[in-house]
Amino acid sequence: MHITVQRDKLSNAVSHVSKAVSSRTTIPILTGIKIKTDDEGLTLTASDSDVSIEVQIPLEEAGEWGVTIHKPGSIVLTARIFSEIVRKLPSNEIHIQVDDRLVTQIRSGQAEFTINGMDASEFPQLPHLEEDKVFSVPCDLLKAMIRQTVFGVSTSEMRPILTGLMWSLDQGELRFVATDSHRLASRTAMVECPDDLSFHNVVVPGKSCNELVKILDDDQNPADIVVAENQILVKSKHILFYSRLLEGTYPDTTRIIPQGSKTEITVSTKELLQSIERASLLSREGKSNVVKLVTLSDGTVEITSNAPEIGKVTDILLPKAMNGEELKISFNAKYMIDALRAIDSTEIKASFTGPMSPFVIRPTDHDWMLHLILPVRTY
């Protein structure tokens, strides 16, 4: 193999695929990045058996040169070393040449590296997915939907299914749900898809979703999503992102969302967030990070927290509206902060059905986002 490639494009592609390289694998070939050439350009691939990422550098794009193929071929190079080399090369042109013994020469400007490669034929093949379930979502919307929910996935392996983000599609409405059984985050959006396309219980590992957010562009270009039996594929420009799906049945979360409410508070998202962050300064020093919310008869809301060994904090909030029964409720401050930070509206409505029942937070200006938090027993 012999190629000349533009450094910035190669560096970008290497940083994308490196996100799928496993640092803790016992299979040596998976510590590498596969580099392969064909008539269309250069393709880089990495996989850790959960996530696989493939990035193509075309010969040229929009009139800008990307890569020249002098002699086609393929090689696998150790990701850690290769990515460091590419980052530190001096010139904008990089020459990569591989001989019959897989010895790889990388030249740029006055710098020259010679490293040992691995046989590309040993690299696992990417899954071939039947593309009968395909729909499109703008990249920026997909990133926003993941960011607004993925923090709610469980970090405990006690129930592996809860470590994933549940995707479902019904009549063009895409829904993401995350829960760790103490809180729930849900986000919906209308997407472009065939009329007859629907699925549920597609559970994508939270870790995969976080990596996907890092490599998608912040633009409105559509990402095509293919859902298969045990894999999902996201295609965006020259990037293919594969992730395995989690096995098992995701719990039916619709049953736990209260339909009515006994107390409702409408308040500025920013003011409530800042108040809980202040209260959390003391509560997080304790083990439980619990904050208490009390509605007062004068129409204000009191936010307090108490860490016996440090002290206590009291904060008074003036809500935009408040109605229903008086309320005293305690909750984990971190869960509330995560939810409020994910909401992009200026006002929220919090609906409570009692001090020991889950409560719901929704934006006031739209209905495509919902957060549910379980209270904490403090007495």
Image (tube, helix red, strand yellow):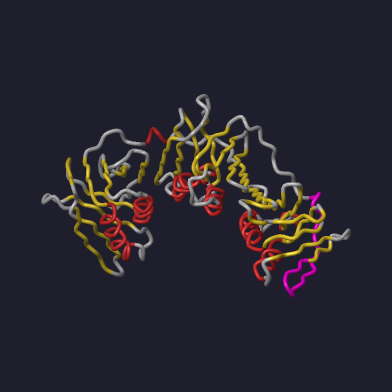
Q: Is residue 47 visible?
A: no
Q: Is residue 266 visible?
A: yes
Residue at (27%, 48%) from the top-left corner? Answer: 347
Q: Residue furthest front?
A: 63
Q: Is residue 113 magenta?
A: yes
**Residue 243 in picture, x, y percent from top left:** 61, 44
- Position of the N terminus, as image quadrant, is bottom right
**Residue 38 in picture, x, y percent from top left:** 76, 48
Q: Residue furthest right?
A: 100
Could you say which is closer to the camera, residue 287 or residue 88? 88
Could you say which is closer to the camera, residue 242 or residue 109? 109
Q: Residue furthest top?
A: 196
Where, by quadrant of the figure, is residue 118 drawn?
bottom right
Q: Which residues are magenta?
A: 106-122
Q: Is residue 191 magenta?
A: no
**Residue 114 in picture, x, y percent from top left:** 80, 69
Residue at (35%, 55%) from the top-left corner? Answer: 337
Horizontal placement of 20 versus 214: left or right? right
Where, by quadrant of the figure, is residue 204 drawn?
top right
Q: Is residue 282 above or below residue 366?
A: below
Residue at (20%, 56%) from the top-left corner? Answer: 317
